[in-house]
Amino acid sequence: MTAETGLRLGVNIDHVATVRNARGGAYPDPLRAARIAEEAGADGITAHLREDRRHISDADIDGLMAVLSVPLNFEMAATAEMQKIALRHKPHAVCLVPEKREERTTEGGLEVAREENRLAHYIAPLREAGCRVSIFIAADKRQIDAAHRIGAEVIELHTGAYCDAHAEGDITTRDRELEGLREMASYARSLGLEVHAGHGLTYDTVQPVAALPEVRELNIGHFIIGEAIFMGLQPAIAEMRRLMDEARS
């Protein structure tokens, strides 16, 4: 974490594994990407072990736990299989996300309010094992209240709608989504929750979110990995870090 800003950057390495898996070999290696990300100033590494193993593999999680010197944020669906894996590894953080086999990427936040009782029981052993439990949710008061009630320590606000509106040039929707993120970040913090944010953030969209004082961490992956094709992974991360620090200062 950069002392001047109090804002952490988590780098998601999922799509290094996507490229690797396209050929079925061992290259490019997500663990190498994680080590480079650490050197470039990432405060943590995020990896999503999907049920269908479309990118990150079980072996990748094994390797990350063995080599990382920064925290691992283990994204996963709230299934019995994933709970078992998380309890075996005991990563620094577990982030529960919604997951559908047919989706290309995570399409929205977790429906916590509708599954409050199940999720409360689901996260209890994870918390007892020492994992910080985070819930990936929409910027919605009902979902934030439910996340708080079930004992989550962290929420991660879904920034996808804000980023999509920006990309489409819909300024009215973009600004409305940003205001919603601002209001709900403040509300969540008032409940004692730590606030993170992520999904779809780019160089063009990161600064307004990074400027929100309640947000303590941004998790960014796909854009950084895409930019790395053109400029290299370390410079791509360094530029994101620079923009975050500039916005926070």
Image (cartoon, rainbow, N blue to C red):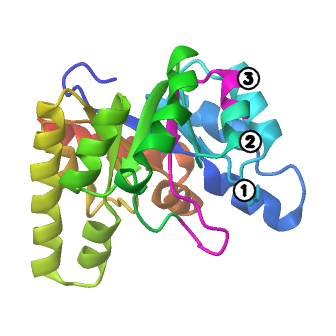
Tell me which segment is drawn in magenta.
85-105
Q: Residue at x 18, y 52 (%)?
A: 141
Q: Residue at x 41, y 57 (%)?
A: 111
Image quarter where the N terminus lies is top left
The Cα–Cα distance between marks 3 and 1, rounded to whole angstroms, is 20 Å
Q: Which amino acid, mark 3?
A: Arg
Sequence-earlier tag: 2 or 3:
2
**Which numbered disc covers residue 81?**
2
**Which numbered disc covers residue 55?**
1
The answer to which image quadrant residue 218 occupies is: top left
Sequence-earlier tag: 3 or 1:
1
Task: Determine crowd level at label 1: few under 14, some 14-19, many 20+ residues with C-alpha closer than 10 A.
Answer: many
Of the two numbered discs 1 and 2 in the rendering, the one whose residue sits closer to the viewer? 2
Task: Determine crowd level at label 2: few under 14, some 14-19, many 20+ residues with C-alpha closer than 10 A.
Answer: few
Q: Which amino acid, mark 1?
A: His
Residue position marked by numbered label 3 in the rendering: 88
Sequence-earlier tag: 1 or 2:
1
**Which numbered disc covers residue 20?**
none
Local secondary structure at mark 2: helix
Q: Is residue 109 above or below residue 133?
A: below
Of the two numbered discs 3 and 1 in the rendering, the one whose residue sits closer to the viewer? 3
Left or right? Give the position of 30 relative to 94: right
The Cα–Cα distance between marks 2 and 3, rounded to whole angstroms, is 11 Å
Local secondary structure at mark 1: loop
Left or right? Give the position of 173 relative to 201: left
Image quarter where the C terminus lies is top left
Q: Is residue 229 above or below residue 113?
A: below
x and y percent of residue 26 in the render? Answer: 87, 49
Q: Residue at x 41, y 42 (%)?
A: 135
Q: Which amino acid, mark 2?
A: Glu
Left or right? Give the position of 206 relative to 33: left
